[in-house]
Amino acid sequence: MNPPAFQLYADDFIAGTMILSQAEVGAYMRLLCHQWSKGALPDDAGKLERLAGGTVTDDVLAKIPVCPDGLRRNVRLEAVR
């Protein structure tokens, strides 16, 4: 079972999301939370946008690459896990 929370390294998060818009940061955070809860994200644009609650841009997708198993994961979040 996953721990109910993950550490957020504020300075790293701010530095890593400086180029993102407010909407992109919100989508990214929702996707990170879903990944934490479920272990991975689908590689399907429609599903990602429903999970994110809005548009998922290429800049956000770049932070959550597709893994060899075909699912998306943020590498840093998995290191924290």
Image: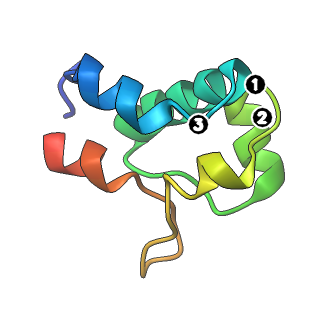
Number of marks in the rendered image: 3
Image spot of residue 72 (x, y percent): 50, 60
For the residues labelled 1 and 3, the Cα–Cα distance comes to 20 Å
For the residues labelled 1 and 2, the Cα–Cα distance comes to 5 Å
Q: Is residue 26 left or right of residue 2?
A: right
Residue 5 in view in this figure: no
Residue type for callout 2: Arg
Residue bearing mark 3: 19
Return the disc, 1 or 3, that comes first in the chain's sequence: 3
Residue type for callout 3: Ile
CB contact under 8 Å: marks 1 and 3: no
Quadrant occupied by the N terminus: top left
Q: Residue at x 31, y 56 (%)?
A: 75
Single out the mark in the foreground, 1 or 3.
3
Res. 53 mark: 1
Return the disc, 2 or 3, that comes first in the chain's sequence: 3
Q: Residue at x 62, y 54 (%)?
A: 61
Quadrant occupied by the C terminus: top left
Count neighbours of disc 2 (C-alpha within 10 A) and say few if under 14, some if 14 to 19, many if 20 or more. few
Q: Is residue 24 left or right of residue 19?
A: right
Res. 50 mark: 2
Residue type for callout 1: Gly
Image quadrant in which you'd find residue 43 = bottom right
Q: Residue at x 49, y 54 (%)?
A: 64
Count neighbours of disc 3 (C-alpha within 10 A) and say few if under 14, some if 14 to 19, many if 20 or more. few
CB contact under 8 Å: marks 1 and 2: yes
Element at label 1: loop
